[in-house]
Amino acid sequence: MKNILIIGGGAMGSAFSIPCLENRNRVTITEPYSKIFIKNHLTKNKFHSALNMRLPKKLKFRKFSKNLLNENFDLIVIALSLSGIDFIGRELKSLGIKTPILVLTKGLKYEKKTNKLFTISERFKKKYNMKNISILKGPCLAKELARKNQTSVIVANKNINIAKKIGKIISTKYYLTEFSKDVIGVEICSAIKNIYSMIIGAGQSLNASSNLFQKSVIEMSYLTKYFKGEEETTLSLAGVGDLYVSAAGGRNSKMGSYLGKGYTFKTAKKRFMLHDTVEGEQLAREIAPYILKKVKRKKIPLMENLLKTIINNKKLKIKV
Ligand SMILES: NC(=O)c1ccc[n+]([C@@H]2O[C@H](COP(=O)([O-])OP(=O)(O)OC[C@H]3O[C@@H](n4cnc5c(N)ncnc54)[C@H](O)[C@@H]3O)[C@@H](O)[C@H]2O)c1
C-alpha cells in the first residue's frame, strides 16, 4: 500500500483516484484553484459534477496547503491543467520536495526570455529544480476511466525501472500501463495531438478527416523528431492512440468542425462552446510564437494553418 497525493480535483485527477484506490493505496486529493471542484469533493455524497458520478468514499479530500505537500507521500500526482503548472512548480520548489512526481498534465510551455519551448518535465527540472519526475499520457477520457472502462496509458521515465514501479502502484485490470524511456517524445506527442485533433475535426466528411489524419501523423512524426523525441513514439499510445480518441470524441475536434464549416474561432467559441475549455486553442497560443518562427513551415502546413487561424482569428484555409 502506497500513500498517494493527487493535486487537482478536476475530471482527470478525480478519475485517476479510482484505479489507485482499487489497487489498495491510500489516496488523498487536493484542489488548489477551483471553488467548484472543492465543493464537489466536500459534499457528503462526493458527487463530482464533471464526471457526473459519486466518487469513492475512501478518497480523502484535504485542503491545499504547504503543510499537506510536506507530508510523507510515496507519490505526488499532478493533474492540473497547463495553466497551473508554474504555480505548482513554484510551490514544490519552495519546499524542496524530493517525493517522486507523476505528471498527468498535457501541454508545452513557451519561455519568451529564451524563445524556447519546453515540455512540462523539462520545465519542472530546469526552472523548479525538481528531480524525480515521471509522466503519464495516452488515450484516456476521464469519464470512461472513472467508470472503469478499459484504458491503456503510457508511463515514461528515462529510468524505465522507475516507470515500471509506478505502473505497479497504479494499474488495475481495467487501467493498463505501458512504459517508455522517451520522455520528450511522449510529452510532445500528447501535447500536439490537441492541435491535430482540431485539424482532423475540421474535415466535413469521414473521407476528408481520414486524409487529414494521415497528414497529421506525418507532421507529428516530424515535430517529435525536431524536438529530439523518438519518431516511433508517434505510433505509441501517446501519439496515434491519443490522437484517435481526441479526434473521435473530444472538444478540440468539435471546435475543429466549426472551423471547417467556415466560422472563425471567436465566433464558434461564443456561439457553440462558450463554457468549454478547448485545450488545443490554449496550446496554439502558447506555442505559436515559437513554431511559426523556428520550424520549417513546409514540413508542417497543417499546424501552421491552424495556429494562424487561432491567433489571427481568421477562417481556416485547409481544404476540407
Ligand atoms: N494523462 C492522462 O491520461 C490524461 C487524460 C486526460 C486528461 N489529461 C490532462 O489532465 C489535465 C487536467 O485535465 P482535466 O480533464 O482534469 O481538466 P479539468 O478542467 O477538469 O481540471 C483542471 C484542473 O486544473 C486546475 N487549474 C486550472 N487552472 C489553474 C490555474 N491557473 N492554477 C492552478 N490550477 C488550475 C483546476 O482547478 C483543476 O484541478 C489536462 O492537462 C489534460 O490534458 C491527462
Image: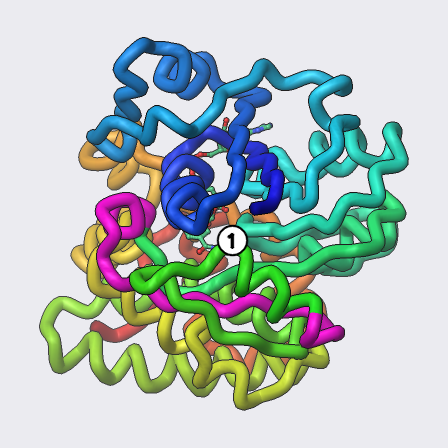
**Left or right of residue 302: residue 296:** right
Is disc 1 surrounded by few (<14), some (14 to 19) or many (20+) residues within 10 Å? many
Q: Quadrant of residue 182?
A: bottom right
The residue range painted magenta reads: 142-161
Q: Is residue 92 above or below residue 146?
A: above
Of residues 274 and 8, the one drawn nearer to the viewer in this rendering: 8
Q: What kind of element bears circle 1?
A: helix
Residue 246 drawn at (x, y percent): 31, 61
Q: Is residue 41 magenta?
A: no
Q: What residue lies at 30% left-to-right and 51% top-to-bottom?
A: 145
Question: In the picture, which quadrant includes the C terminus?
Answer: bottom left
Q: Residue 39 in the image: x percent, y percent?
A: 39, 12
Instruction: Residue at 30%, 79% (x, y): give it.
Output: 213
Please name whichever residue, 70 or 57, is drawn nearer the observer in this view of the structure.
Answer: 57
Q: Tell whether position 154 is magenta.
A: yes
Residue occupied by mark 1: 284
